[in-house]
Image: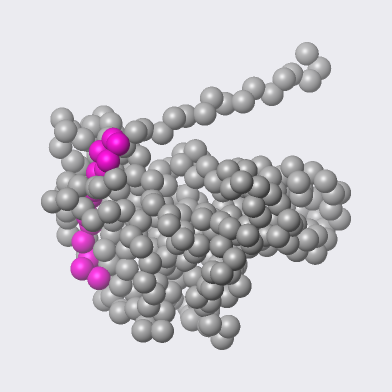
Amino acid sequence: LIQPRHRKSKKRKLPDDYPWPGVQAPNHLHLLDFVTRTIRGAGRFYACNLLDQFHRWPFLRAETPKSAAVVSQFLVSGWQDVGLPGGLYIDNDAVWNGGGRGQRVLSTIVRLCLLVGVEVIFIPSYTYEANPVIESFNRLWDSNFWRRTSFRDLSHVQSELAFFEHYCRHRRSLAGFDGLTADQIAPDFVPALLPADFDQHQQKRLPITAGKVHFIRFVSSAGAFSILNERWQLDKEQWSGKTIRATVATQGQRLLVYHQPKESTACKLVAQFDYPLGEETSPLADELRREHPAFWLPAQE
């Protein structure tokens, strides 16, 4: 009665037709999440956790505040250190989703990703179980880093974080990888680093670059789904309750809707719409072009 037992919320099982992106190599897909913590007398800060899904290689920082400029600099610093990924798998936080600023607004973070040739993949809203690898890492960060030290201020967190990052990269045995450490999983991997002098993220407004932005969404009982504050309608009888991937192809300014049936590795194009963005699209710079495997097999028409 004095200290009631904490009851864990029941973990929701994702639908069988959830289109998990296929990951085949280091820096194929990066996972991003921020964890909020407060230091007594020093205020709130954000743990910025960037993790490569293939070999669990982390890039960790602690920042305040969580603004578009801070997140942009964090991503640039991370990609200068661990290399550019093919895609970034993230939740729908207002900082990188674009918030409630109107329809079809591509945020600064999305524009930065497109600018450097990174596809963005948004998980469904309020569905943390769709990003289990980063959620597991966040729990490790909490138990093996945050709870083991009484931090004085943000600079103290930042200084100790370097040791924890080194531990995660070189000393921690990974479950599911036969006890290997992150640096042993792909020892010969050479990342494609973002140039050290890259500074285009400091522009007041970034252009929209040719690329793809994916939104994984659950279709409502009415046959509808929403992206960037806009509702789209599919055939209710056929798609109610299904999970779809809505892809904004910025170069052609089209919205392509795909479905990946249960126990299938291939997706199917089920609908497409015009998706004018109100801006011209710039081509990806030649020096930032990279080849990486597709996250989903080619669509079946």
Q: Is residue 60 left or right of residue 130?
A: right
Residue sitting nearer the eye, 105 or 145: 145
Residue sitting at 17 percent across and 50 percent down?
300
Question: Picture coordinates of residue 20 (x, y %)?
Answer: 38, 46
Vertical arrangement, residue 194 with respect to residue 153, above or below: below
Residue sitting at 49 percent across and 81 percent down?
200
Residue sitting at the far top = 1
Question: Picture coordinates of residue 209 (x, y %)?
Answer: 34, 74
Question: Picture coordinates of residue 198 (x, y %)?
Answer: 53, 83
Task: Residue 155: name its quadrant.
Answer: bottom right
Residue sitting nearer the eye, 232 or 48: 48
Task: Residue 252: name its quadrant.
Answer: bottom left
Task: Reply yes or no: does residue 262 show up in magenta.
Answer: yes
Q: Is residue 94 left or right of residue 282?
A: right
Chain part drawn in magenta: 251-264
Residue sitting nearer the eye, 36 or 53: 53
Task: Residue 196: name its quadrant.
Answer: bottom right
Q: Can residue 233 be seen from the camera position used here? A: yes
